[in-house]
Amino acid sequence: MGSEVGRREFLKYTATAVGAFLVGVGVGWAVKPTPQPVTTPTPGLPEIKAYFIPSTPIEEPWVGVVHHALQKAAETYPNVTYDWTENVPYAEVPRVMREAVGSGYNLIFADVFGCEEEARDVAKDYPDVYFVLGSGMGPVDPNVCVFDDWIHEPAYICGAIAGLITESNIVGVVGGYAIPEVNRLINAFKAGAKDYNPDVLVKITFINSWYDPPKAADAARAQVDAGADVMYAERYDPFTVTREKKIPTFGNLLDQWELAPEVVITGPEWDMWPAVNEVISMINEDRWQAKDLAEWTMMAKGGAKLAGWTGPTDDTWHGYRDRLDPSIVAKLDENNVLNIVDKLIKDILSGRFKVPINELVPVSD
């Protein structure tokens, strides 16, 4: 990777400083279980008490995707209960992991990108507890699975759409940090745009923040002023600018069409349910294996999606024809976008086309 700083290293440096400050001022995080309804043990199935430890608020999209999938697990499986904390600094995550185990939780989900080794030390001390870690490192026998969002495939499709509908041949991208997990999305988007329009220029701006709406809006405005007429909002919130300028836009991680219904076409969407379902199934069926859950977060297993896509009809993308600005609808129709997207999705799902994974820092044209 050369001089590229991975998410793990970047966040660990940040976490060390923040954690030291918080400990110094006396801030602490403790497991405070939400009272659970009394449940009758399910015959033949183990009792699974799941707990989630994220480093940001539940409202943050990446964390929210995991949270909603775990809520679904508790609703789907009678032997599963679920609780969570939130906004735990990485320096505190290992301690909270230990407290969760001490409180009786036996399936721990945690965001450990900023405390990779320390989290694995905790898992090593509790070999009979299942750990599923949001991580940039690999699984560890006997009890550590790992996951992340692998939504590069729908990102590529969004890039293809952008390349097809741009009139200025300039497409903008507003990203968070230039780290592998973000790089692979932006590189896939750029590859899609150039595969379907070799003349397109892809302008990329990193705001060096996970959440800074004013800064993201400023970056989008600068790109629009420089000629970009399509935008990929890897971070929130270029929508305020693209709505005003009627710029076709792609969201990220969640189905974000409601944030700007007249301009947001679609976006790469992450669904953690297939991965969570696999974890619960492994435990219930006594076939647990420490493994990387990446394939359960890709399109073939339903973990990655093109947001709102239901097929090449007027109902797709939440009734795109009725909600999008007429100028955007015209561009989609004139370039036969729905049929091209339909074929591309089928080719990816059938294995006829494989979206390249490139985690190097993307270069702005």
Image (cartoon, helix red, strand yellow):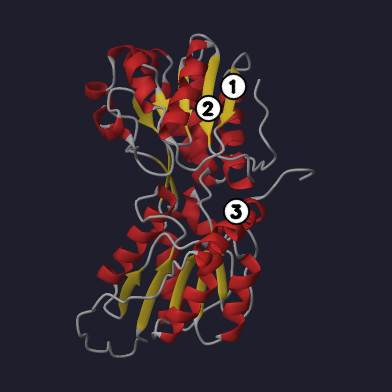
Quarter of the figure with residue 121: bottom right
Give the percent coordinates (x, y) of residue 315. Answer: 25, 31
Image quadrant occupied by the C terminus = top right
Q: Nearer the viewer, mark 3 or mark 1?
A: 3
Q: Residue at x 33, y 38 (%)?
A: 308
Disc 2 residue type? Val
Q: Earlier in the sequence, mark 2 or mark 3?
A: 3
Q: Earlier in the sequence, mark 2 or mark 1?
A: 2
Q: Nearer the viewer, mark 2 or mark 3?
A: 3
Mark 3: few/some/many CA within 10 Å (<14, 14-19, 20+): some
Residue at mark 2 to residue at mark 1: CA–CA distance:
7 Å
Disc 3 residue type? Thr
- Front-most of residues 321 and 65: 65
- Residue 202: image tag: 1
Going by the image, does 39 lie left or right of 125? left
Task: Look at the picture and state if 215 lies above or below 104.
Answer: above
Q: Residue at x 53, y 27 (%)?
A: 173
Residue at mark 3 to residue at mark 1: CA–CA distance:
30 Å
- Residue 173: image tag: 2
Q: Residue at x 47, y 74 (%)?
A: 96
- Name the element at disc 3: helix
Residue at far right of view: 2
Image quadrant occupied by the N terminus = top right
Give the percent coordinates (x, y) of residue 216. Answer: 46, 30
Task: Look at the picture and state if 344 lies above or below 141.
Answer: above
- Residue 14: image tag: 3
